[in-house]
Image: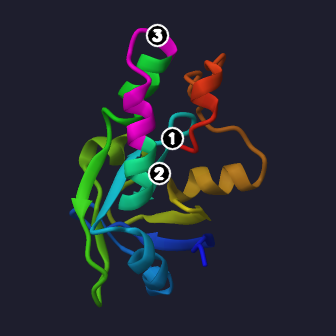
Protein backbone atom coordinates (compact mmCIF):
# COMPACT_ATOMS: atom_id res chain seq x y z
CA UNK A 1 0.00 0.00 0.00
CA UNK A 2 1.37 3.38 -1.00
CA UNK A 3 1.89 5.88 1.80
CA UNK A 4 0.64 9.45 1.55
CA UNK A 5 0.57 12.31 4.04
CA UNK A 6 -1.99 15.05 4.47
CA UNK A 7 -2.81 17.79 6.92
CA UNK A 8 -0.77 20.43 8.64
CA UNK A 9 1.19 20.75 11.86
CA UNK A 10 2.58 23.87 13.45
CA UNK A 11 6.18 23.46 14.55
CA UNK A 12 8.77 25.78 16.06
CA UNK A 13 12.08 26.35 14.31
CA UNK A 14 14.86 26.28 16.91
CA UNK A 15 17.72 28.80 17.15
CA UNK A 16 19.95 26.60 14.95
CA UNK A 17 17.37 26.23 12.16
CA UNK A 18 16.15 22.77 13.10
CA UNK A 19 12.64 21.33 13.09
CA UNK A 20 11.56 18.31 15.07
CA UNK A 21 9.28 16.44 12.69
CA UNK A 22 5.97 15.13 14.04
CA UNK A 23 5.99 11.53 15.26
CA UNK A 24 2.71 10.89 13.43
CA UNK A 25 4.73 10.80 10.17
CA UNK A 26 7.20 8.18 11.43
CA UNK A 27 5.61 5.36 9.42
CA UNK A 28 5.62 7.49 6.25
CA UNK A 29 9.32 8.33 6.66
CA UNK A 30 10.20 4.69 7.38
CA UNK A 31 8.54 3.66 4.12
CA UNK A 32 9.78 6.48 1.88
CA UNK A 33 12.91 8.28 3.06
CA UNK A 34 15.40 5.64 1.87
CA UNK A 35 17.99 7.01 4.31
CA UNK A 36 17.73 10.66 3.29
CA UNK A 37 15.52 13.71 3.02
CA UNK A 38 15.93 16.59 0.56
CA UNK A 39 14.71 20.12 1.19
CA UNK A 40 14.68 22.70 -1.61
CA UNK A 41 12.94 25.88 -2.73
CA UNK A 42 9.36 25.85 -3.90
CA UNK A 43 9.53 27.16 -7.49
CA UNK A 44 6.39 29.27 -7.13
CA UNK A 45 5.91 30.40 -3.52
CA UNK A 46 8.11 31.61 -0.63
CA UNK A 47 8.12 28.16 0.92
CA UNK A 48 10.19 24.99 0.93
CA UNK A 49 9.50 21.48 -0.30
CA UNK A 50 10.68 18.43 1.64
CA UNK A 51 11.07 15.25 -0.38
CA UNK A 52 11.66 11.73 0.95
CA UNK A 53 14.87 10.31 -0.55
CA UNK A 54 13.14 7.82 -2.86
CA UNK A 55 10.87 10.47 -4.43
CA UNK A 56 13.77 12.92 -4.74
CA UNK A 57 15.79 10.37 -6.74
CA UNK A 58 12.89 10.08 -9.20
CA UNK A 59 12.31 13.84 -9.52
CA UNK A 60 15.96 14.87 -9.71
CA UNK A 61 16.74 12.29 -12.40
CA UNK A 62 13.89 13.69 -14.52
CA UNK A 63 15.26 17.23 -14.15
CA UNK A 64 18.79 16.08 -14.97
CA UNK A 65 17.62 14.21 -18.09
CA UNK A 66 16.13 17.39 -19.56
CA UNK A 67 19.52 18.93 -20.36
CA UNK A 68 19.90 22.66 -19.99
CA UNK A 69 19.57 24.34 -23.38
CA UNK A 70 16.05 25.69 -22.86
CA UNK A 71 16.09 28.81 -20.66
CA UNK A 72 12.93 27.82 -18.75
CA UNK A 73 14.27 24.34 -18.11
CA UNK A 74 17.59 25.76 -16.93
CA UNK A 75 15.85 28.22 -14.59
CA UNK A 76 13.88 25.36 -13.02
CA UNK A 77 17.03 23.25 -12.66
CA UNK A 78 18.75 26.13 -10.87
CA UNK A 79 15.75 26.64 -8.62
CA UNK A 80 15.07 22.99 -7.75
CA UNK A 81 18.41 21.19 -8.09
CA UNK A 82 20.69 24.13 -7.35
CA UNK A 83 19.01 24.81 -4.01
CA UNK A 84 18.55 21.20 -2.93
CA UNK A 85 20.02 20.19 0.41
CA UNK A 86 20.21 16.46 1.00
CA UNK A 87 20.62 15.18 4.53
CA UNK A 88 21.00 11.71 5.95
CA UNK A 89 17.89 10.81 7.88
CA UNK A 90 17.01 8.00 10.19
CA UNK A 91 13.70 7.49 11.84
CA UNK A 92 14.67 7.82 15.47
CA UNK A 93 12.89 8.95 18.59
CA UNK A 94 13.57 12.59 17.74
CA UNK A 95 13.28 13.10 13.99
CA UNK A 96 15.16 16.35 13.40
CA UNK A 97 15.68 18.27 10.15
CA UNK A 98 18.29 21.03 9.77
CA UNK A 99 17.24 23.68 7.24
CA UNK A 100 20.17 25.63 5.71
CA UNK A 101 20.16 29.41 6.20
CA UNK A 102 19.80 30.18 2.48
CA UNK A 103 16.59 28.13 2.36
CA UNK A 104 15.28 29.63 5.60
CA UNK A 105 15.82 33.08 4.08
CA UNK A 106 13.87 32.14 0.93
CA UNK A 107 10.87 30.98 2.99
CA UNK A 108 11.18 33.74 5.61
CA UNK A 109 11.63 31.18 8.39
CA UNK A 110 12.86 32.78 11.61
CA UNK A 111 14.39 31.11 14.68
CA UNK A 112 12.01 30.43 17.55
CA UNK A 113 8.99 31.17 15.33
CA UNK A 114 6.28 28.79 14.19
CA UNK A 115 6.19 27.23 10.76
CA UNK A 116 3.47 25.28 8.98
CA UNK A 117 4.53 21.73 8.08
CA UNK A 118 2.05 20.63 5.43
CA UNK A 119 1.54 17.08 4.13
CA UNK A 120 0.99 17.15 0.37
CA UNK A 121 0.61 13.49 -0.54
CA UNK A 122 4.14 12.22 -1.18
CA UNK A 123 6.02 15.29 0.07
CA UNK A 124 5.77 18.15 2.57
CA UNK A 125 5.76 21.91 2.25
CA UNK A 126 7.32 24.14 4.92
CA UNK A 127 5.85 27.64 5.27
CA UNK A 128 6.35 30.68 7.42
CA UNK A 129 3.16 30.57 9.51
CA UNK A 130 2.05 34.09 8.51
CA UNK A 131 2.36 33.29 4.80
CA UNK A 132 0.53 29.98 5.30
CA UNK A 133 -2.33 31.78 7.03
CA UNK A 134 -2.52 34.30 4.16
CA UNK A 135 -2.72 31.49 1.60
CA UNK A 136 -5.46 29.80 3.63
CA UNK A 137 -7.48 33.03 3.59
CA UNK A 138 -7.05 33.39 -0.17
CA UNK A 139 -4.73 36.36 0.23
CA UNK A 140 -1.75 36.96 -2.03
CA UNK A 141 1.83 36.17 -1.10
CA UNK A 142 4.93 36.89 -3.13
CA UNK A 143 5.08 34.49 -6.08
CA UNK A 144 7.73 33.67 -8.65
CA UNK A 145 6.98 33.82 -12.37
CA UNK A 146 9.29 30.84 -12.98
CA UNK A 147 6.35 28.56 -13.75
CA UNK A 148 4.87 30.69 -16.52
CA UNK A 149 4.98 29.18 -20.02
CA UNK A 150 6.73 25.98 -19.02
CA UNK A 151 7.65 23.48 -21.72
CA UNK A 152 5.17 20.55 -21.65
CA UNK A 153 7.79 18.02 -20.50
CA UNK A 154 8.44 20.13 -17.38
CA UNK A 155 4.76 20.25 -16.47
CA UNK A 156 4.75 16.46 -16.18
CA UNK A 157 7.33 16.37 -13.37
CA UNK A 158 5.57 16.08 -9.97
CA UNK A 159 7.63 18.69 -8.10
Position of the C terminus by quadrant: top right
State the CA–CA distance, disc 1 to disc 3. Answer: 22 Å
Of marks 1 and 3, which one's residue comes earlier in the chain? 1
Asked if the residue under mark 3 is in contact with the one under mark 1, i.e. CB atoms within 8 Å, the reply is no
Residue under numbered circle 3: 71
Q: Position of residue 105 (x, y in %)?
A: 35, 42
Q: Which residues are magenta?
A: 60-72
Residue 141: quarter of image = top right
Q: Is residue 13 above or below residue 47?
A: below
State the CA–CA distance, disc 2 to disc 1. Answer: 10 Å
The answer to whether 56 appears left or right of 36 in the picture is right
State the CA–CA distance, disc 3 to disc 2. Answer: 23 Å
Q: Residue at x 44, y 86 (%)?
A: 23
Asked if the residue under mark 1 is in contact with the one under mark 2, i.e. CB atoms within 8 Å, the reply is no
Q: Nearer the viewer, residue 142 or 93?
A: 93
Secondary structure beneath dot 2 equals strand
Q: Position of residue 85 (x, y in %)?
A: 27, 48
Closer to the eye: label 3 or 2? 3
Q: Nearer the viewer, residue 77 or 142?
A: 77
Residue under numbered circle 2: 49
Q: Residue at x 36, y 52 (%)?
A: 39
Residue 139: quarter of image = top right
Chief SS of the magenta region = helix
Closer to the eye: label 1 or 3? 3
Position of the N terminus by quadrant: bottom right
Q: Nearer the viewer, residue 18 or 150?
A: 150
Secondary structure beneath dot 1 equals loop
Secondary structure beneath dot 3 equals helix
Q: Residue at x 61, y 55 (%)?
A: 132
The answer to whether 101 appears left or right of 140 in the picture is left
Q: Which mark is residue 46?
A: 1
Q: How many marks?
A: 3
Amino acid sequence: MEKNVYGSSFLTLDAKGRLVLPARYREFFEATCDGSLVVTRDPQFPSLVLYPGALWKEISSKFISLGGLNNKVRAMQWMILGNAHETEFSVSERMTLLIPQILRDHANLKPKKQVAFVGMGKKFEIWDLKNWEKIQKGEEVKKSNTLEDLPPHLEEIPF
